[in-house]
Image (cartoon, grey):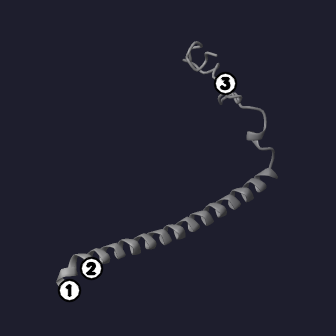
Amino acid sequence: MLETYFGLIEATFVFGLAVAFYIWQRNDLKKEKAKDLAKAEAAARHRAAEAAAAGSAGPDPAAGAPSSAGPDPTGSRHDQPGRNQDTPDRQG
């Protein structure tokens, strides 16, 4: 009689293994996400501590006037070489 239900029993085992694997992977991903979050928080605290230590050394150059070496801080494209003024993104 067992051989008449062999396919059903095998399908039940395969489905059970699939569910168990899904649960295992979900839990593993949750653990990895928690580890990554903890690492990111530790890195942020470290950067904040470094910034506080650097802040006592002098003003932050990024917080001052815009540098002449970088792009226009307003985000306009008029000063970028190779840009045509009548491109579709410039038309009103």
Please state the horizontal and vertical placement of residue 68, each as a whole percent of the image: 70, 27
Residue type for callout 2: Ile
Residue, x 81% and y 46% (percent of image)?
Answer: 58
Q: Residue at position x 71%, y 28% from top?
A: 74
* Separation of marks 3 and 2 at Cα, in angstroms: 67 Å
Q: Residue 64's quadrant in the figure?
A: top right
Q: CA distance from mark 1 to mark 3?
A: 76 Å
Taking 29 as reference, is 65 above or below it? above
Residue matched to label 2: 9
Whole-number angstrom distance, CA of label 2 to CA of label 1? 9 Å
Q: Quadrant of residue 77?
A: top right
User: Can you tell which mark lies on residue 76?
Assistant: 3
> Circle 1 sits on which residue?
2
Instruction: Give the position of the N terminus as an image quadrant.
Output: bottom left
Q: Nearer the viewer, mark 1 or mark 3?
A: 1
- 62 and 79: which one is in front? 79
